[in-house]
Amino acid sequence: MEIEMDSPLAERLVARQEVPYDVAIVGGGPAGLVAAAHCRMRGLNSITFEAQAFGGQLVSLYPSKPVTNFPAHLDVASGELARRLAEQAAHFGAELKEHEAVESVGYAVDVGFFVRSSSREVKARSVLLALGMGRFRPRKLGLKDEYRFAGRGLVYRLPSRDHIVARHAVVVGGGDTAVDTAIALKAIVPEVTLVHRHVGLRAYPHSLERLDASGVHVIPEAEVVGFGGDGVLDRVLVAVRDQAAQEIPADLVLVSVGQAPDLGGLADWDLKLTLDGSHLPVDSSMRTAIHGVFAAGDFVAYPGKIKMIATAAAEGSTAAASVERYLRIQA
Ligand SMILES: Cc1cc2nc3c(=O)[nH]c(=O)nc-3n(C[C@H](O)[C@H](O)[C@H](O)COP(=O)(O)OP(=O)(O)OC[C@H]3O[C@@H](n4cnc5c(N)ncnc54)[C@H](O)[C@@H]3O)c2cc1C
């Protein structure tokens, strides 16, 4: 897809004299981070955008899971593996932009590829898409008053320590993230209650031991069914199985009931991608149907594709080699 030259964006980019990046990488999960490292090792000038935190699913979906199948590691915590991948890319000199979502990618003859993120527009000679399952958005509880208190005491991610002034926090959820969050909050907030739906929690034994010792009050087989407060949240309504709903004081409610993947924004990109469901078909060199556009990781489809950290990393490396070959031919 090409952008007409009367497009204000294309005109703006033509007017700017800066040298385009060799490659713009979208996505900073294992595939994007390994691609960033390998592009730099090959002497390519790259920029990598990550909408959230570097590490992709390793930090968004299972931040404290032991990973036991990554080559040369018997057991490495997912968050630690993510950190090392980002560190390696930075070590080779890759330009990395975290918490900076790409909102559109397009192509114009006089510009080449252009990438618009939440805070900049850059030109690039090629593009490498490592979008994984897309960005992740926190799942909501689906309660009537939820939107009213969002940001007014109701949050979906743990705020930074400096922003927490609460006296009574309620964490909703029964998985590892909810348990870790409740333990982390207890070090800052005097009273913390964990409300979860099932009899038991779905967390690692090690986390459960820490929870027992933390002083967090746990209410099992319970659901938050309502919020209260005059503009700002000061209580929640909790329904425990077989009992009438009760009010609990709460000036901070942290909902931790999972993350939903979202590739929705792609349809609005200037670069029209033809997806197979939510995947982009590639050949064995990680080339897509669009000249100069490469892809790697969970986002791609090819016969025999498996979704693993090691394969995402390997595809990132293959894609980097293909980008280099492509740029050499173009030169
Ligand atoms: C619960 C669970 C457990 C798993 N356990 C293992 C395991 O033990 N071992 C194993 O090998 N594999 C495991 N996997 C699979 C593994 O996590 C994935 O195969 C791997 O993360 C894929 O890496 P990726 O870089 O392709 O995608 P992702 O990890 O999904 O990263 C893609 C990144 O792109 C970013 N992004 C998307 N859109 C944009 C945009 N517009 N702008 C900027 N950034 C964007 C996203 O925010 C995301 O961070 C597990 C998966 C799950 C769900």
Image (cartoon, rainbow, N blue to C red):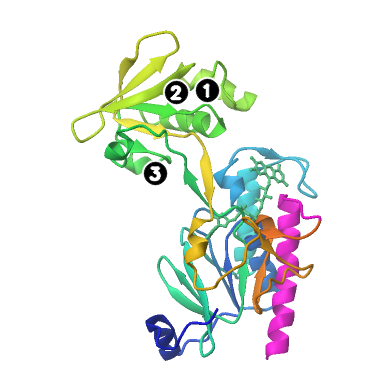
- Which of the two discs, 3 and 1, labels the residue nearer the N terminus? 3
Residue position marked by numbered label 1 in the rendering: 211
Image vertical order of residue 234 relative to residue 19, above or below: above
Answer above or below: position of 226 versus 8.
Answer: above
Do the residues bearing badges 1 and 2 touch, measured as CB atoms within 8 Å?
yes
Mark before the other along the chain sequence, 1 or 2: 2
- Local packing at callout 2 (Cα closer than 10 Å; few below 14, some 14-19, many 20+) is many
Residue 115 position in % (x across, y down)? 50, 73
**For the magenta stretch, what is the residue range?**
304-331
Residue 280 pos. (x, y %):
66, 63
**Residue 293 appears anywhere in the view:** yes
Quarter placement of the N terminus:
bottom right
Q: From the image, which quarter does the C terminus lie in?
A: bottom right
Residues at marks 1 and 2, CA–CA distance in whole angstroms: 10 Å
Percent of width and height locating residue 41: 70, 73
First in residue order: circle 2 vs circle 3:
3
* On screen, residue 123 above or below 258: below
Amino acid at the residue labelled 2? Leu
Q: Tag on residue 226?
A: none
Q: Which of 287 and 40 is in front in this view?
A: 287
Amino acid found under the numbered disc labelled 3: Ser
Total label count?
Answer: 3
Q: How crowded is mark 3: few (under 14 residues within 10 Å), some or many (20 or more)?
A: few
The amino acid sitting under disc 1 is Leu
Report if the beta carbon of the residue with label 1 is closer than 8 angstroms to ligand 1: no
Whether 102 is among the magenta residues is no
Q: Nearer the viewer, residue 268 or 306?
A: 268
Circles 3, 1 touching at the beta carbon (< 8 Å): no
Q: Mark 2 points at which residue?
A: 194
Q: Mark 3 points at which residue?
A: 160
Name the secondary structure under disc 2: strand
